[in-house]
C-alpha cells in the first residue's frame, strides 16, 4: 500500500479579537478569545459584526481621514465616500479586502481573521503567570465558540497542555452532541440565559429556547460546573416574572454553582461597525445598581445559589 | 474654645495647604514639577524670578525680596563650599519663622535657596563636550544637584551639636586644603540651628499671646522641643519627626533634594519606646507623620530588605500609609514588593490607590533591583538590599552612593535621527541591522561624552554647588573632608537613562514593514516625508501607514523585538564603559521624567508617524494605541522585557479605572499584576487610578476638581498646577491606556 500523508493541516478558527486582562469573563484574571459567528441575533448586542461566521469588512469612523484610497482600490467600485457618508455595496463585495490593504489608518479593516491554535497561544501564554496567581485562565467567548467545535476543542486541549484553566462562555444554541463535546472538555461553562419563554426569546434573540433549554438540562448530567449569566435589559427581560421563570430553569441543573446578572451598558461612543450588519439602535436606560442588587437578592433566594451583579 | 481633636487639626492643616497651593498657582503660575510643602513668603517679601531648577529645567520661582546673597565671584554670584555655606547660613538665619498652632511640628520653608543662584561657576569650563551634547541632544547632567539620599540616621544619632563636633574634629585632622569644605559644613549647621531656634522663639511668642490655655501649652511645647533639638539628638518620636522635618525642608530649599529614605525604619525605635512608655498612640504617630509630609512631600520607602535580607516592614510602615491616605495630597511613598516582603503592605497600598485615587503609593520591584545592582562592580548583596527608594524613578544607598540619578538622559530618537540619515546616505537601502550598527556606534559616542561629563562633575562640583547638606549625613564625607559629589562617599554609580524607546522601536518596525517588506515607500521617499514633516496629502497618508504598523507593547510584534534590541544596545554601551580617570561604573535605566515634551521638541519627524517636535513616549511605556484592548498585562510584559537589569529602574506608568476593583477579586487582580510585573523583571510601577470621564471634565475645566492629584511620572502633583501642555500629555497617556 502506498504511504499516505497522515499529517493533518492545523485546525483554524475565525476570531475577532483576543482581550487580555479580562476581569469579568470568569474567575481570576483571564484572556478572552472572541470567536466569530453566533446563532443568535440579540437585539441589544454591541457587536452585531460578530454574527456572521466569516470575516466582514468593518469601518472605524473615528480613524477615517477621508483620503479615498479604499474607493480607488476596490475593483468593483463597491465603495463610495462623499459628503453624504460612506456607501458600501455588500451584495457584490468579493471580500478581497484590497480596500483595507490601502487604508493607511486601518479605519477600514476586515473584522474577523482566521488563526491557528498556535497563534492564539502566542497571545495568551505570556499571561500564564497572572492566571496562576489569580486562579484565572482563558475564556472562549464571542460570538459562539461552540459553533466552531473543532477549533474550540483544539484550543481547549492546547491550553490544558500548558496547565491553563478554560471557560466557555456560551449562548447554548448549538446542536446538542456538538455542544456537549465541547462543554465536557472545558473547566467551566458560563451559560447565558436571556429569557424563559420561547416566543419572547425568539423575538429578542431570533431563536426560541428549545435547544438552549435542552442543552442546559443536558449539562446537569455532566461534570463541568456552570455559572449562569443573565443579561438584564430594562424593558425587555428584567420583569420579575421573567426572572422567576429563569430561576425555575436554573433549579433543574444541579451543576450550576453561581449566577451573575449583567446590567446593560450602552457603548460610550463610536466604534468599529461591520459594514454588512444591520444595527438596531436601542434606547435603553441602564439598570441602576439598586435595582440590580434587588434582582440579585431575589434570584439568590429563589435558587439558593449565590447571585452577584455588575 | 480648646485644642481641637487630631482629626479636626488635620482637616485645618489640609485646608490651609490647599490655600497655599492656590496662592502658589496664582503667583507662580504653572508648575510642571513636584508639588512641595513650600509656603509663599508674606506678600511684601516676595519677588518672582526665573531660575533653573534642581532637575535642570527653567522654572518660575519666588525669592525673598529683601534678602540678598553675598557674592564671592566677580560675576555677582556665589560658588564653592564657603560661598555656598555662608549664603545658606545667612539665608536660614534670615528665613521668617512659621508655626501653625494646629500642627504637631513647627516650621515651613518659603523659598528655594537655589533660586538665588544665577548659574554655574563660569570658571569651570566644559566647552569641549558641548558639541557632542548639541549633536545628540544629550541631557548631560553637568552640575546637576542632589538626586542621591543621605542617611538621616547619622543626624538622629548625633544631633546638630554632635554634627558640628564631628565636623570640627575632622577639620582638625585633615589638611588645610579641606578646610573650605569643613567651613562650609559648619556654616550650614549654624544656619540650621539658627533657623530652628528662631522658630522656637516664634512658637514661644505665639504661646504667650495665645488666649486658649491648651493651645498655648502646645505652642510652649513646640518651643521647648525645638530648642532641644536645635542642639541635641532627638529622644522621642515627635522630636525625631521634627528633626527630620527641619533637615528635609532645609535640604529641599538648598537644592530641591527630597529624599527622606526609609522613614518607617528610622522612626521605629522611637515608636516602640514611646508607645511602651505610654506617651505615644498610633493616632498621634499618624498625625505627626502627616504633619511632616504636609511640609515636605519627600520621597520615602516603606518596607524592603535590610542588609541581611529581613523584611523591614513594621507598624510605622502602615501608620505612614494611613497618614498619606488621610492627607490625600501629592506624596511620594514607594512601597517595596518582593518575595520576602509583607503582602499585607502591598494589599493595603493597592486598596489605598483605589480608595483615595491620588496616585499613592508607588510600587518598587525590590527583588529585580537587588539582583540587578549586584551586577555592577563593587556592589555586594548587602549593598543592593540597602538601596532605598528616594526619588522619581530612582534609588540610592543612603549616605553611601552618588549617582545624580534622573539627571542624565539620552534621547534615543535624537540618536536614531542621526543614525538613519547616515545609514541611508552611506548605504542607500540599509536593512534594520545596518541601521542598528550605525546607531550603536553613535550610542557609544553618547555614552563616552556623558562619561567625560561625570568625571568633570566629580572634579568640579565642589567648586560650584557642593552638596553640603547631604554631605553632613553621608559616610566618609566629614571623615575625609570630601563632598559627596567628589569622592566623599563609597560608591559612584552614575545613572544614564534612555528615553523615547517606543518611538524608535515603532519606527524600526514601520521601516521594516512598509519600506523593506511591502516596498510601499522607498527610503528616498521616507526621508523626504520626514524632512518635510509629512507635508501634503501624500505625506499624511504615508504618516498614517507608518503609524498603523504593530507597535511595541502589542506582544510578539516586530516592534517588540526592536524595543528589546534597542534596550540591549543601550545597556551594553553603558555598562561596558567606565568614566575616564576614575573608572566609575555607569548604570542604565529607561525614564523620561517629565521631559517628554522637551525631548520631543528636539527631534524631527520620526518613521513611526510622529510629527516633528511632538512629545516622545513616557519612559519605557509603549506609545498610545499599542493594543486595541490596551491590556495592562501586555504592557507589563513589554516593559518587563526591556528592563536594563543593572539595578536602576525602567518604570511602568500604569493608569486604571476605579471600576477595576469594583467587583470581588479586583484588588487581588491588581496585586497579582504588580507581583507578576516584578517577577518578570519589572522594577517600578507608578499608578494612577482615575475615572476617564472625570479626567475629560477636569481637563476642560481644572477648577471643577481643584484637589485632583495625579501621579505625573515619578512625582505627584495637583492636576490644576500643571501647564495646559503638560495636562494634555498626562490626559493623552491616561485616556489612551486606561485599563477598565
Image (tube, coloured by chain):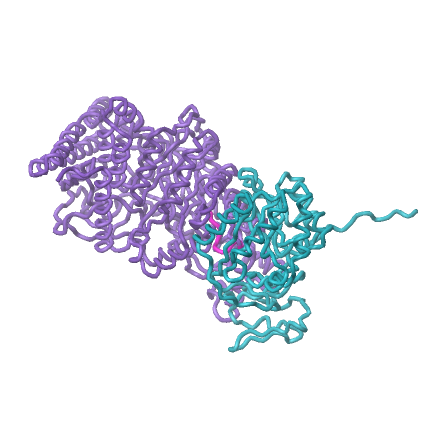
Chain colours: A cyan, B purple
**Viewer-proximal residue, B608 or B74?**
B608
Residue B330 is a magenta residue: no
**Viewer-proximal residue, B568 or B350?**
B350
Q: Is residue B597 visible?
A: yes
Write the start and end of the magenta stretch as one range. B620-628
Residue B621 is a magenta residue: yes
Residue B667 x/y as whole percent: 45, 41
Q: Is residue B566 visible?
A: no
Single out the residue that lies furthest toward the bottom. A83
Q: Is residue B514 left or right of residue B340?
A: right
Image quadrant where residue B202 sits: top left
Q: Is residue A231 left or right of residue B82?
A: right
Number of numbered markers = 0
Residue B734 x/y as whole percent: 42, 53
Q: Is residue B311 left or right of residue B15?
A: right
Q: Is residue B189 left or right of residue B437?
A: left
Image quadrant where residue A245 sits: bottom right
**Viewer-proximal residue, A19 or B58?**
A19
Residue at left 38%, top 44%?
B355
Residue B561 x/y as whole percent: 57, 48
- Asked if B78 appears above or below B734 in the picture, the reply is above
- Asked if B685 appears above or below B608 in the picture, the reply is above
**Viewer-proximal residue, B250 or A12?**
A12
Residue B715 x/y as whole percent: 35, 45
Amino acid at each position: 500500500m502506498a504511504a499516505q500523508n497522515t499529517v493533518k493541516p492545523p485546525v483554524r478558527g475565525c476570531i475577532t479579537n483576543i482581550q487580555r486582562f479580562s476581569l469579568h469573563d470568569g474567575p481570576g484574571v483571564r484572556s478572552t478569545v472572541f470567536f466569530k459567528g453566533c446563532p443568535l441575533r440579540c437585539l441589544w448586542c454591541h457587536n452585531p459584526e460578530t454574527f456572521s461566521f466569516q470575516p466582514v469588512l468593518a469601518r472605524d469612523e473615528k480613524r477615517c481621514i477621508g483620503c479615498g484610497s479604499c474607493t480607488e482600490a476596490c475593483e468593483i467600485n463597491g465603495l463610495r465616500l462623499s459628503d453624504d457618508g460612506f456607501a458600501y455595496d455588500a451584495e457584490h463585495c468579493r471580500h478581497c479586502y484590497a480596500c483595507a490593504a490601502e487604508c493607511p489608518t486601518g479605519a477600514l479593516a476586515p473584522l474577523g481573521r482566521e488563526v491557528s491554535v498556535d497563534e492564539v497561544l502566542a497571545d495568551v501564554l505570556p499571561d500564564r503567570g497572572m492566571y496562576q496567581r489569580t486562579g484565572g485562565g482563558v475564556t472562549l467567548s464571542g460570538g459562539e465558540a461552540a459553533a466552531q467545535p473543532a477549533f474550540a476543542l483544539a484550543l481547549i486541549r492546547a491550553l490544558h497542555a500548558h496547565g491553563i484553566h478554560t471557560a466557555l462562555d456560551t449562548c447554548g444554541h448549538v446542536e446538542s452532541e456538538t455542544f456537549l463535546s465541547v462543554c465536557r472538555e472545558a473547566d467551566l461553562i458560563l451559560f447565558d440565559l436571556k429569557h424563559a419563554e420561547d416566543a419572547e426569546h425568539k423575538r429578542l434573540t431570533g431563536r426560541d429556547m428549545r435547544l438552549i433549554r435542552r442543552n442546559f438540562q443536558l449539562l446537569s448530567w455532566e461534570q463541568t460546573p456552570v455559572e449562569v449569566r443573565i443579561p438584564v435589559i430594562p424593558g425587555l427581560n428584567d420583569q420579575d416574572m421573567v426572572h422567576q421563570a429563569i430561576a425555575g430553569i436554573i433549579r433543574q441543573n444541579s451543576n450550576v454553582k453561581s449566577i451573575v446578572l449583567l446590567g446593560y451598558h450602552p457603548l460610550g461612543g463610536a466604534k468599529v461597525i461591520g459594514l454588512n450588519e444591520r444595527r438596531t439602535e436601542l434606547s435603553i436606560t441602564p439598570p441602576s445598581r439598586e435595582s440590580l442588587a434587588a434582582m440579585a437578592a431575589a434570584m439568590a433566594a429563589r435558587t439558593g445559589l449565590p447571585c452577584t451583579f455588575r | 474654645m480648646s485644642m481641637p481633636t487630631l482629626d479636626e487639626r488635620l482637616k485645618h492643616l489640609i485646608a490651609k495647604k490647599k490655600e497655599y497651593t492656590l496662592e502658589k498657582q496664582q503667583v507662580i503660575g504653572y508648575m510642571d514639577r513636584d508639588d512641595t510643602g513650600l509656603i509663599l513668603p508674606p506678600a511684601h517679601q516676595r519677588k518672582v524670578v526665573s531660575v533653573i531648577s534642581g532637575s535642570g529645567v527653567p522654572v518660575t520661582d519666588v525669592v525673598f525680596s529683601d534678602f540678598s546673597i553675598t557674592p564671592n565671584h566677580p560675576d555677582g554670584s556665589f560658588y564653592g563650599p564657603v560661598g555656598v555655606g555662608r549664603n545658606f547660613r545667612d539665608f536660614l538665619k534670615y528665613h521668617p519663622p512659621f508655626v501653625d498652632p494646629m500642627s504637631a511640628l513647627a516650621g515651613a520653608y518659603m523659598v528655594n535657596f537655589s533660586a538665588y543662584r544665577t548659574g554655574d561657576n563660569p570658571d569651570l569650563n566644559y566647552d569641549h563636550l558641548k558639541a557632542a551634547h548639541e549633536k545628540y541632544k544629550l541631557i548631560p547632567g553637568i552640575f546637576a544637584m542632589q538626586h542621591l539620599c543621605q542617611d538621616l540616621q547619622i543626624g538622629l544619632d548625633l544631633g546638630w551639636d554632635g554634627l558640628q563636633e564631628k565636623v570640627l574634629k575632622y577639620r582638625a585632622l585633615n589638611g588645610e586644603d579641606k578646610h573650605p569644605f569643613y567651613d562650609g559644613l559648619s556654616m550650614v549647621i549654624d544656619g540650621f540651628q539658627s533657623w530652628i531656634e528662631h522658630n522656637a522663639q516664634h512658637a514661644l511668642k505665639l504661646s504667650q499671646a495665645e488666649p486658649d490655655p491648651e493651645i498655648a501649652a502646645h505652642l510652649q511645647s513646640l518651643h521647648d522641643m525645638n530648642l532641644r533639638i536645635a542642639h541635641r539628638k532627638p529622644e522621642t518620636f515627635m522630636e525625631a519627626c521634627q528633626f527630620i522635618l527641619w533637615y528635609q525642608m532645609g535640604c529641599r530649599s538648598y537644592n530641591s533634594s527630597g529624599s527622606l529614605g526609609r522613614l518607617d525604619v528610622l522612626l521605629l525605635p522611637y515608636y516602640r519606646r514611646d508607645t511602651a512608655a505610654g506617651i505615644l498612640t498610633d493616632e498621634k504617630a499618624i498625625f505627626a507623620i502627616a504633619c511632616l509630609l504636609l511640609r515636605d512631600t519627600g520621597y520615602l520607602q516603606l518596607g524592603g530588605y535590610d542588609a541581611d535580607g529581613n523584611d523591614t516592614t513594621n507598624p510605622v510602615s502602615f501608620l505612614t500609609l494611613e497618614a498619606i491616605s488621610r492627607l490625600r495630597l501629592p506624596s511620594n511613598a514607594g512601597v517595596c514588593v518582593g518575595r520576602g516582603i509583607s503582602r499585607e503592605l502591598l494589599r493595603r497600598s493597592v486598596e489605598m490607590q483605589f480608595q483615595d485615587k491620588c496616585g499613592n503609593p508607588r510600587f518598587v520591584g525590590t527583588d529585580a533591583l537587588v539582583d540587578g545592582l549586584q551586577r555592577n562592580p563593587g556592589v555586594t548583596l548587602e549593598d543592593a538590599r540597602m538601596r532605598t527608594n528616594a526619588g522619581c524613578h530612582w534609588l540610592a544607598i543612603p549616605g553611601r552612593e552618588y549617582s545624580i540619578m534622573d539627571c542624565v538622559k539620552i534621547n534615543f530618537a535624537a540618536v536614531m535621527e542621526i543614525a538613519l540619515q547616515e545609514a541611508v546616505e552611506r548605504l542607500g537601502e540599509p536593512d534594520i541591522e545596518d541601521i542598528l550598527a550605525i546607531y550603536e556606534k553613535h550610542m557609544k559616542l553618547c555614552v563616552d561624552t556623558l562619561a567625560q561629563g561625570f568625571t568633570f562633575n566629580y572634579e568640579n562640583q565642589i567648586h560650584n554647588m557642593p552638596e553640603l547638606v547631604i554631605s553632613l549625613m553621608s559616610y566618609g564625607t566629614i571623615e575625609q573632608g570630601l563632598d559627596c559629589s567628589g569622592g566623599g562617599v563609597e560608591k559612584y554609580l552614575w545613572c544614564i537613562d534612555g528615553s523615547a524607546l517606543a518611538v524608535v522601536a515603532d519606527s524600526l518596525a514601520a521601516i521594516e514593514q512598509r519600506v523593506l517588506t511591502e516596498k510601499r515607500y522607498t527610503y528616498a521617499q521616507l526621508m523626504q516625508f520626514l524632512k518635510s514633516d509629512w507635508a501634503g496629502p501624500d505625506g499624511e497618508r504615508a504618516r498614517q501607514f507608518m503609524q498603523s504598523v504593530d507597535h511595541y507593547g502589542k506582544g510578539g510584534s516586530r516592534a517588540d523585538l526592536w524595543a528589546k534590541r534597542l534596550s540591549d544596545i543601550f545597556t551594553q554601551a553603558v555598562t561596558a564603559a567606565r568614566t575616564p580617570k576614575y573608572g566609575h561604573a555607569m548604570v542604565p535605566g529607561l525614564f523620561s521624567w517629565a521631559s517628554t515634551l522637551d525631548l520631543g521638541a528636539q527631534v524631527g519627524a520620526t518613521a513611526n508617524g510622529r510629527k516633528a517636535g511632538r512629545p516622545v513616549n513616557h519612559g519605557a511605556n509603549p506609545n498610545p494605541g499599542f493594543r486595541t484592548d490596551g491590556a495592562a498585562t501586555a504592557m507589563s510584559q513589554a516593559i518587563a522585557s526591556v528592563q536594563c537589569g543593572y539595578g536602576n529602574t525602567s518604570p511602568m506608568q500604569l493608569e486604571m479605572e476605579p471600576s477595576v476593583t469594583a467587583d470581588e477579586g479586583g484588588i487581588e487582580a491588581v496585586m497579582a499584576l504588580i507581583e507578576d510585573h516584578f517577577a518578570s523583571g519589572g522594577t517600578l510601577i507608578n499608578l494612577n487610578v482615575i475615572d476617564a470621564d472625570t479626567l475629560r471634565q477636569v481637563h476642560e475645566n481644572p477648577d471643577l476638581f481643584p484637589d485632583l492629584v495625579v501621579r505625573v511620572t515619578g512625582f505627584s502633583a495637583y492636576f490644576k498646577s500643571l501647564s495646559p501642555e503638560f495636562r494634555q500629555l498626562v490626559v493623552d497617556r491616561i485616556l489612551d491606556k486606561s485599563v477598565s
